[in-house]
Amino acid sequence: MTPDRERYPRRSDRTDASAWDEKLAEGYRGISDRIMRELPFFNKALSVEAIGFRGHEGGIVGVMVRPWFMNVVISAPPAAAQSSTGPGSSLRLRFPCGTLEFSPAEVAPVGPIASASLFSPMLGFDDMASTRAIAEAALAVLMSSVAASHSSNAPRFGLIDRRHFLRGALAERGT
């Protein structure tokens, strides 16, 4: 069961997440306009959008959609930012569905973040409405403890593989 503070964040948590995700989206819009727009894997049917950002374990987490990829993104908590050592480093972060591996980065104007890839490239997506629905579904699985059930019929995963995550295998029950 999700604690009430996770399901119903305080107003200030929602306000902070909303302001933070808009700054993050603004940073990626700049990257989109300056660098990515003319690359062959840029999907012109999509735009930059922050989906479902909310407070989680001292950070802010949600899904970031860009015309070139979709990631789960979390604001890097200070301890996580300090433990990252540069290119190739990774962080293991705990969520209700289990532990995911994230790559640390820095994005102006928000600073340190950590991200886990969901889709890359985004060429198979036709429009923002369906892309948004997929992002919302991925976030729902991420924040669901059903996947981490201790039932003997539940699948067992250590570190969550993104292929299992995307195929919905984490929410399946054995028969």
Image: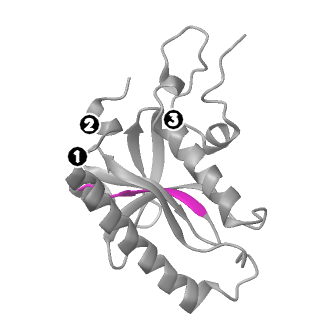
Q: Give the quarter of the image for residue 107.
A: bottom left
Q: Say if mark 2 contacts mark 1, CB within 8 Å.
A: yes
Q: Which colour scheme is used?
A: one colour
Q: What residue type is labelled 2?
A: Arg
Using the numbered discs, state the Cα–Cα distance from disc 2 to disc 1 in whole angstroms: 7 Å
Label annotation for residue 10: 1
Q: Is residue 175 above or below residue 169?
A: above
* Residue range (magenta): 70-77
Given contact means CB atoms under 8 Å apart, are the residues at marks 3 and 1 in contact? no
Mark 2 surroundings: few (<14), some (14-19) or many (≥20) residues within 10 A: few
Type of the residue with mark 1: Arg
Closer-to-camera residue (102/151): 151
Res. 159 mark: 3
What is the quadrant of residue 43 in the picture?
A: bottom right
Most frequent secondary structure within the magenta stretch: strand
User: How far from the left and from the top, in percent, is residue 144?
Assistant: 48, 32
> In this rendering, is residue 1 above or below 7?
above
Q: Is residue 74 inside the magenta stretch?
A: yes
Q: Which mark is residue 5?
A: 2
Q: How many labels were placed on the picture?
A: 3
Q: What residue type is labelled 3?
A: Leu
**Residue 153 x %, y %:** 61, 10
Q: How far apart are marks 2 and 3 (CA)?
A: 25 Å
Q: Which of 20 and 167 is in front in this view?
A: 20
Residue at 43%, 79% in the rendered image: 26
